[in-house]
Every structure is written in C-alpha cells, then in structure tokens.
Image: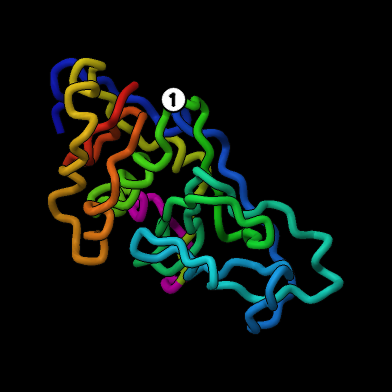
Amino acid sequence: MKTPHGWRSTPLMDLVQQPVSGVSVLSSEELPSASNPGVLRLSCVSNGRFNLRDLKTPIPSEVHRLSAFAEADKIIISRSNTPQLVGASAYVKSTHPNAFLPDTLWSLRPKDKKLSIRWLSFVLNSDAYNLTIQSIAHGTSDSMKKIQKGSFLKLPVLLPPAPRAAKDRRHPRHLGRGAGKARRPHRRQSPPQTGPHAATPHRPPPPAGV
C-alpha cells in the first residue's frame, strides 16, 4: 500500500511501551466473590470489548504471585490464543485492582500521554489490522498461536500530518471498511480525543491530534 502524501510510517514500539503481562497461577473456575482477587480469562477480551466479570479464582497460596492488573486507559490484548482469536484486544476504561492478568494477556501503555490509547484500540480492532497481527502469530499447535513481543512491536503504523489530524478529529468514521458486525459498537463510541492515526489497508478512524 502506498503511503499517503504527508504521512509517515512508524513501528508500534515508538507509540507504546513494552507490553506488560501477568503470571500463570493455579486457579479454580469459580467466579471470585466481591472484593476478592480474580484472574482474567482469555475470553475477557472479545469483539473489541472488555468483560470484567470473566474471571476465575486463584487458590489462596498463589495470590501473592499476582502482579499486573487491569488499569484505566490501557489496552488488554491476547498474546496467546486460537488462530482466530489471537491478538484480540479491548480498551479498558477504568482501573480494576482485583482483576489480574495471566501470562497470556498483555497490557499496552502509551509512551506519550498525547497518544490516545483508546484510538489505538480502534486501530487494533479493525479487521485489516487484526489480520496483520494474526499473521505474525506462530506455534507448533494448530489450535494455539502466540505473538512475540519483538514481532508485534515492529508492526507499522501510519501517522498523518498534524493539519489533517486537527481537521478530522471529531469524525473517526473510517475504522476498517471491512469491519464486521462484531466490531460495529466501536463505530458508535465517542471519538478518541488525542493521538496519531495508525495505518491499516482500510484506514482506521482519524485521530484527534498528534
């Protein structure tokens, strides 16, 4: 794909910090009771949505090992999953200190506060970019694929010229023209407030600023 005039390509590593993952702990399948810690399941991110109730209960002797939890204004992404679901991600609106990440989920944090991580979530959830993420997933099993940090952070993102970003900041309407029904709720959400434009073969919504 030819780069539009005035745009520039940059790898994801220039936009986000090193992905943070949790740890694998022994857990029961029961939903934890209120105020008790829980471990997020892989299915907590699906169709661009974050399901806080999709938790299991760590056994008491493992609780002290829990570390990374769901934080506000971050993206949670599945780094290990089935070929169809690996790379599934969702924007987290608020902090949940009792919802901990397993080692199969990453938390993405922006390097620059000017970047709208919510906008980046729109980009990652476009059909075109999701296919790009799936293409770098590998594994010896046909039923489970994994994404390596190095490959993920090298994925390209297109940044638009600032004047265009300012002009289009209120209209993130072009989130992957091929986006399916599962991703339609994203087009109804409020537009991101800040951040650069990322590239996919079908252009994602324009940013609010750079």
Q: Say which of 38 and 21 sits in front.
A: 38
Q: Is residue 67 left or right of residue 182?
A: right
Q: Say which of 3 and 68 sits in front.
A: 68
Quadrant of image for the N terminus? top left
Quadrant of image for the C terminus? top left
Residue at the image point whose x is 36% and y is 58% from the top: 48
The residue carrying mark 1 is: 114
Q: Is residue 43 above or below residue 89?
A: below
Three-letter amino acid code at the position of disc 1: Lys
Q: Is residue 165 left or right of residue 105?
A: left
- Chain part drawn in magenta: 133-143
Q: Quadrant of residue 6?
A: top left
Q: Secondary structure at mark 1?
A: loop
| x then y, percent, for residue 148 | 51, 48
Residue at the image point whose x is 39% and y is 30% from the top: 11
Residue at the image point whose x is 50% and y is 61% from the top: 80
| x then y, percent, for residue 176 | 19, 48
Q: Quadrant of residue 53?
A: bottom right
Q: How is the image coloured?
A: rainbow
| x then y, percent, for residue 141 | 47, 70
Residue 1 in magenta stretch: no
Please rate how many residues cluster around mark 1, counting C-alpha atoms within 10 Å: few if below 14, some from 14 to 19, many from 20: some
Most distant residue in the right direction:
61
Q: Is residue 129 above or below residue 141?
A: above
| x then y, percent, for residue 46 | 39, 65
Q: Is residue 7 above or below residue 104?
A: above
